[in-house]
Amino acid sequence: MSPTAKPPAPRASSGIATWRAEPETAAVQLTDVTFGYDARPVLKGITMTIPRGKIVAIMGGSGCGKTTILRLIGGQLRPQSGEIRVGGLSVPDLDPDALYDLRRKYGMLFQFGALFTDMSVFENIAFPMREHTDLPEELIRDLVLMKLHAVGLRGAAQLMPSELSGGMARRVALARAIALDPMLVMYDEPFAGLDPISLGVVGQLIRRLNDALSITSVLVTHDVYESLKIVDFLYFVSEGRIVASGTPEDVRASHDPFVRQFVDGAPDGPVPFHYPASSYRDELFADAG
Amino acid sequence: MPAELAGGLAYWLRRLGGGVTGAIAQLGYVARFLLAVLWHTPAAFRRIQLTLREIYFSGVLSLVIILMSGLFVGMVLSLQGYETLKRYGADEQLGILVALALVRELGPVIAGLLFASRAGSAITAEIGLMKTTEQLAAMEMMAVNPVARVVAPRFWGGVISMPLLAALFSGFGIFGGYVVGVRLIGIDAGAFWGQMQAGVDFWPDVTNGIIKSVVFGIAVSLIAVFEGFDAKPTAEGVAGATTRTVVISSLAILALDFVMTVFMFRGAASA
């Protein structure tokens, strides 16, 4: 259970587990993190380790707090309590300049790409290079074309975002996310709304880029099947807590009710179909009696 | 019954208090936002092409509506002014009436209202949509401050464009007044321009108009960028923010115009 335990290898578990990794091998470490909006708690004591060079998926139903975890890691939100460390640095304690320095080492793929709509594909990928480097224009051009080639869209360099399909936009956003060769890439629902071919392409790109560039990837998704093909470890979040975790093999073999409901796509189970409400009978016959 | 009355009174007092404190808090938030914009202004000006681009979008693309409106306002002003002045045998004073009305008042105010509707609403919608589609969040995650990269250039683009648009509005208005007064009605051209030259002073008439247009430019641009940045990231949120930009900007222009006119007239009277 402890993130400092040995050896640095994933531990199979049918229940709640966390990755075994030495602190120095953890790219991201969350310890007992709580967070809420006003009086509504979202995260209730999340502890997780994301080792360097691995792909870790955070899964759960819509609104369970998955994206909030990414925003906390990115420093866009501050936890109410607990510790968030990225590369050994405590993210909530960083001043704005230090936080921006840290973010230069991040790449992030947003759910719908978040491409700048007034810039071409080329300009979108050149954007972080122009903002943070003094590279000559010829070199920026070559680097942009290399990034686009890596995602198979070199030929689309001059298109505008409005001319791209959903899958292409996601791949361009992926190229932009790795533009500055980050140490950590965060993916917010990378598979949402994609056709089966694009789904496979994006999934394989995430795996290939992670391995080729030796980066660490955090994947927030609710696409079980696609994630199981490419990730090294999964955390399941429900109602602000980690309710299960393990390797893809653990998850496939798991009898944990939550994991089974999620993997099998069952409408009812530990995650109820109905939103909490008063008795159906009482509500229907409220006027009768 | 007195208890009910007291309860009702307390309820309305609470609402009033909540409204007042909410408005003060919002003003404080706007002031902090303005400080952030000013703080990031040097960074924005270092890449002047960003501000020039916004001057093009806010200023150049507003030219048609501003020039056409100025022309028609000047023409109507000339017609109406002639009808009134003729009663007192002062129809040759038409030039001074048209010029003073436009330069002191109508130029800055109407150009400001049109600027709020055309450019202010566009700025709010653009920034609001960038927020809705997570483009601002993407910038933040790329360690690029959206206030420096997106907000400050749009703010200064509006502030710089507005006085120029107001000047062009007044210029085209005077031309419209000339067309109607001299070409259509037949007032002597020499009297029209001569009276105008003698009766309109650079200080205070023209400078007061410039001051007003600069203040309106700051007000409209600040309201537009703030509403866009503060918009709820939904379709309704952006629509509401765009509407608020036009409504609040228009009211702000009219209220500021009154306040500034009071001070400007008092200054002229005491001189």
Image (cartoon, coloured by chain):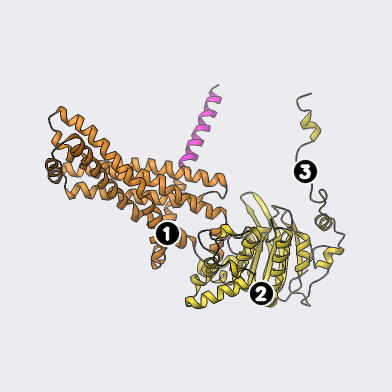
Q: Residue at x 51, y 43 (%)?
A: B240
By secondary structure, the bulk of the magenta-drawn segment is best described as helix
> For the residue labelled by badge 3, is the local secondary structure a helix, a strand or a loop?
loop
Q: Amino acid at mark 3?
A: His
> For the residue labelled by badge 1, is the local secondary structure a helix, a strand or a loop?
helix
Q: Residue at x 71, y 54 (%)?
A: A64
Magenta-highlighted residues:
B1-21
Can residue B263 be seen here? no
Q: Nearer the viewer, mark 1 or mark 3?
A: 1
Residue at which label 1 appears: B152
Cα–Cα span, label 1 and label 3? 47 Å
Colour chain A appears in = yellow
Image coordinates of residue A178 in percent, x first then y, are: 61, 71
Image coordinates of residue B63 in percent, x first then y, are: 35, 50
Residue at which label 3 appears: A274
Q: Earlier in the sequence, mark 3 or mark 2?
A: 2
Residue at which label 2 appears: A215
